[in-house]
Image (cartoon, rainbow, N blue to C red):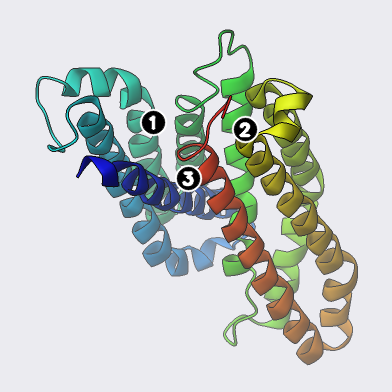
Amino acid sequence: MGDALPLALFADRIGLNVAALLTVGFALHAALGVVERDAFGRLRSLILLAGAGVLVFAGLRLLILNAQMGDGTVLFDPELFPLSWTALGPSTTALSTGAIAGVAGVFAGSRILAGIGAGGLAAGFGLTGHSQGLADPGLAPMAVAAHAFIAGFWVVAPITLHPSARLGNDVLLARLKRFSVIAMAAIPLLLLLGVWLAFVLAGGVTPLLGSIYGWLLLAKLAVGLIAMAMGALNKQVVTTRIERDPAKGRCWLRWTLAFDAMLFATAILAVSAATTIAGPGE
């Protein structure tokens, strides 16, 4: 069992990243009005599934660490669990309470509660990981939290902006425009934070360019740049096409959002590998 733990941790990290970012995103799209209040009901099943995933994967992460601290044969060792909780307890608490608050906010139609949930989830990312392992973390944990907060807002766009048949052209255009207004300010900040964090976590330019860990971080940044270009295409070209030729514009939007979804999946795989398989100095 011990030999399988690194792979299990990698798989768990992918699941936790996906579930947490989706929960952050759904909560933010509700809180910031990207999705109309009368459409909250359609988000309920999605955010409930994502929120449940956060609880499951966060719990599994604790058990895997507990096994790694022992001989690797038992997932739960009551004698070692206090040490595991010391390492991951604050992050697990923030992720769990954030997920519950985000789900509750969407179910109750409360934008404030949904926003608080998204903030709690984002804080959970900053309370663990390599930023906490720095000799002088400084602002790095806060930057990680802000990075996750904005990334979640972006990651759910292929879902909430998907031009489904039940979504009228006027509603779709309104969503696209509301999303674009926020994204124009938030996404460049996301990439700037990503560049700064990559430099700080890798330990400088040389390890960033000369290590597997650095390459994974750079791959994530490259994917982000491509996704930002796709976002600009959606804003400048696709949105205009929907206004002038809705049928063709919707087709273009489906393709660009599908490509965005693939980019986001690639970025999550890269960052999950960087936080489990690789690491600073490797």
Towards the viewer: 98 or 130: 130
Give the number of the disc on residue 146: 2
The percent position of residue 109, horizontal first and vertical second, equals 45, 54
Q: How crowded is mark 3: few (under 14 residues within 10 Å), some or many (20 or more)?
A: many
Q: Name the residue under label 1.
A: 94
- Indicate left or right for 205 with 9 as reference: right
Of labels 1 and 2, earlier in sequence is: 1
Tell me the residue at 54%/52% (across/down): 269
Q: What residue type is labelled 2?
A: Ala
Towards the viewer: 263 or 240: 263
- Indicate left or right for 49 with 137 as reference: left
Give the number of the disc on residue 26: none
Tell me the residue at 54%/39% (across/down): 274
Q: What residue type is labelled 3?
A: Ala
Tell me the residue at 38%/51% (across/down): 11
Towards the viewer: 199 or 21: 199
The percent position of residue 257, horizontal first and vertical second, equals 68, 71
Residue contact between numbered discs 3 and 1, judged by CB atoms under 8 Å: no
* Location of residue 200 by image quarter: top right
Q: Which amino acid does label 1 sit on?
A: Ala
- Indicate left or right for 233 with 29 as reference: right
Of the 4 image quadrants, the one containing the C terminus is top right
* Location of residue 134 by image quarter: top right
The percent position of residue 117, horizontal first and vertical second, equals 45, 40
238 up-or-down from 185: above or below: below
Towards the viewer: 234 or 57: 57
The percent position of residue 93, horizontal first and vertical second, equals 33, 30
Tell me the residue at 72%/81% (across/down): 169
Does the rendering let one see residue 280? yes
- Indicate the secondary structure of the residue bearing disc 1: helix
* Location of residue 247 by image quarter: bottom right
Q: Nearer the viewer, mark 3 or mark 1?
A: 1
